[in-house]
Amino acid sequence: MDTYSRMTFGLLTACACFGQSLSVGAIGGVRGTDDLTGAGATSVSKRYVVGPALEIGLPLGFGVEVDALYRREGYQTGWGNFAYSVVSGERANSWEFPMLLKYHLPFPKIKPFLEAGIAPRTIRGTITSDFIQFFPVTTPLQHSTANTNWSVSNGFVAGGGIQIGIGRLRLSPMLRYTQWDKTAISGLYGDGPSWQSTQNQMDVLLGITWKIR
């Protein structure tokens, strides 16, 4: 376990020990923004996002939420000239781990809230490419596959919504914005198109959790 992971685990353990409540469940929704910029590729990513969620209630209306959000990413691209033609694409699994400080306004049943924090992200996938050469000699179609392990990117997260309590059930519709510190996925070719993942992300989400204490 690295230093960052130990610090995160220690913080969550302390919050859980001193927290006034603990809720577990799931969060899901849809991405409201495009995930690629540039004209060189077409996104084939799924717009859904889903994963487990944990929220620890703290005094004075504050709380801590930790999620593990899964997305299915992908793109397709193709280019060529008189000498060759290439068609390429990637399918990848993206995991985001938002760690958020929340503040709930003191209303009894419907509680508006604000949230902010950070979100490390990992993306791993597979790129497949089909290449054929026309000049000076035509060659048979060549097919290649390569695994990708894009560098970890980190996002600043801010959002808000309302939390509705029905007994121990908690429903939390929200909007969440993430600003990524880098373009995790990118493609640049001297004689072809270029593209990159966007650094601005907006999600429409619904959290469904159960208060266990």
Image (cartoon, rainbow, N blue to C red):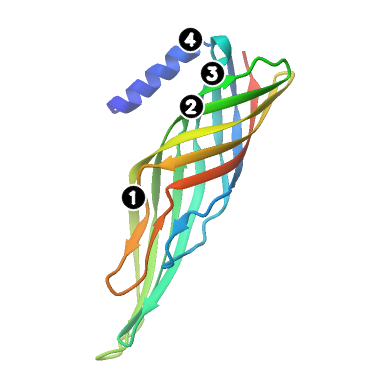
Could you tell me which quadrant the N terminus lies in?
Answer: top left
Labelled disc at residue 17: 4
How far is disc 2 from disc 1 in space, using C-alphas? Answer: 24 Å
Q: How many marks?
A: 4
The answer to whether 122 is drawn above or below residue 37 in the figure is: above
Percent x, y of residue 150: 33, 50
Alpha-carbon neighbours of circle 4 within 10 Å: few (<14), some, or many (≥20)?
Answer: few
Residue 125, numbered circle: none
Identify the secondary structure beneath mark 4.
helix
Please say if the residues under marks 4 and 3 sit with CB atoms less than 8 Å apart: no
Snapshot quadrant of residue 27 = top right
Q: Which mark is residue 100?
A: 2
Query: Could you tell me which residue is drawn at 42 percent across and 63 percent down?
Result: 38
Q: Amino acid at mark 3?
A: Gly
Of pointers 2 and 1, the one earlier in the residue sequence: 2
Nearest to the eye among marks 2 and 4: give it. Answer: 2
Q: Earlier in the sequence, mark 1 or mark 4?
A: 4
Name which residue lies at 39% across and 66% down.
128
Element assignment for label 3:
strand
